[in-house]
Image (cartoon, helix red, strand yellow):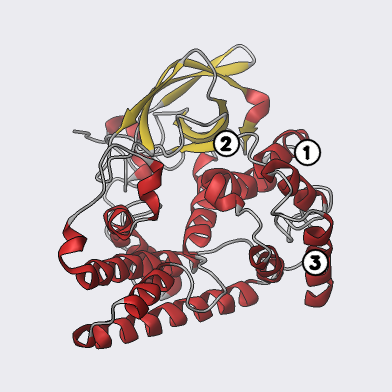
Amino acid sequence: MTEHLVVDAARRLVAEHPPASTPTEEFLGARFDAGLAWVHFPRGLGGLGVAPGLQGAADAVVEAAGGPNPFDLNPMGYGMAAPTVLAHGSPALHERLLRPLYTCEEIWCQLFSEPGAGSDLAGLATRAVRDGDGWRATGQKVWTSKAHEARWALLLARTDPDVPKHKGLTYFVLDMRDPGVEVRPLRQLTGDAEFNEVWLRDARLDDAWRLGDVGAGWKVAMTTLMNERTAIGGGSIERGSGSIGDALALWRSQPDPGLRDRIVTLFARADALRLTGMRHAAERGDGPAGPMGSLGKLVGAELNQAVYELCVDLLGTAGTRHPGYDGDPATHDTLTWKFLRSRANTIEGGTAEVLRGILAERVLGLPGDIRVDKDTPWREVPRG
């Protein structure tokens, strides 16, 4: 299928289901059924079986018509869970999970990071042990965005402590309504509580909802993380949109000749990121998300921070005043909120330091860091 056929399908979608008058869930359901959710997914599962690079053509038509963005509504579901479930889940899980995920009837979260295992994710301590035809999970996860809203979670847990840390992990889909799951909000710099700590106390896991083989959880997790970074760093295909669009709008209303060089430089960086993302999508072809997705995520995160620093400088004394720290969503459109929120961009979804290591080793082919514990059984690795 060529690009113009994807565009024609998207135009039919917005003509038959005008976003302005169609409920969000209904519109997203129609888009899924039209194969325009993830165009590279198989037919019947939200896709058309075409190259991922054609997704932008569909997105542009829907965005221009004012259609909802599922990534904004269900980021862990749309960008991370869906490709992981498709790649490693059973046909029954495909049928059960993908459509309500896309329509945002069921929100997802990602139970990866722990208090003692953030950047060293493979060192995690949450345990899952066999219990009849299922498993029981016990442990603590942290920085879990959307956990307070989520119906399902992507859970990485240790099932064998007697092998090296990367080899003893297994990957599950967890029901967040299980009585063994407790969610506690964490307040952040903006005043919001987007993320949480999650306690698992003998939480029940159905073996039929395991993704990948027992002990192969690290491989499955790489599918999630590569797609996460590609989704976060994908950016917009529309020139001058996103964070740089906020800066341009502010500049037009109150230009400051002393800051002209900064906004020109940032616009050039934003355009380079946009074009690089488009090139990466085209070069990817039919292949899975790879380490190049880390480039967009890294550059985009640092760009967002620089853009909103400029915005605060342009605001002058007004940039020192934030409307409130009580988590009111009405503040989320303010530049001061976006400035504060951008501080997390170089931490969430892989820290800037981790992403530089990935790019150095897996893209540039540079020697890897020394890893003294890679062959040591997890049980024998010292932990703080």
Do the CB atoms of the residues marked 2 and 3 lie less than 8 Å apart?
no
| Disc 3 to disc 1, C-alpha distance | 30 Å
Q: For the view shown, which residue lies furthest in the front direction?
A: 253
> Which labelled disc corresponds to residue 321?
none
Q: Which residue is mark 1?
A: 91
Please tell me which residue lies in front, 237 or 11: 11
For the residue labelled by badge 2, is the local secondary structure a helix, a strand or a loop? Answer: loop
Which residue is pictured at 81% across the width and 76% down the height?
A: 4
For the residue marked with disc 1, what is the amino acid?
Pro
Name the mark nearer the viewer: 3 or 1: 3
Q: Position of 38 compared to 271: left or right?
A: right
Q: Amino acid at mark 2?
A: Ile
Disc nearer the start of the sequence (3/1):
3
**Residue position marked by numbered label 3 in the rendering:** 11
SS class of the residue under badge 3?
Answer: helix
On-image quarter of the N terminus: bottom right
Residue under pointer 2: 107
| Residue drawn at 68 percent across, 39 percent down | 89
SS at mark 1? helix
Cα distance in 3D space between marks 2 and 3: 27 Å
- Is any part of residue 162 visible from this angle? yes
Cβ atoms at labels 1 and 2 below 8 Å apart: no
Give how far apart the Cα atoms at labels 1 and 2 are: 20 Å
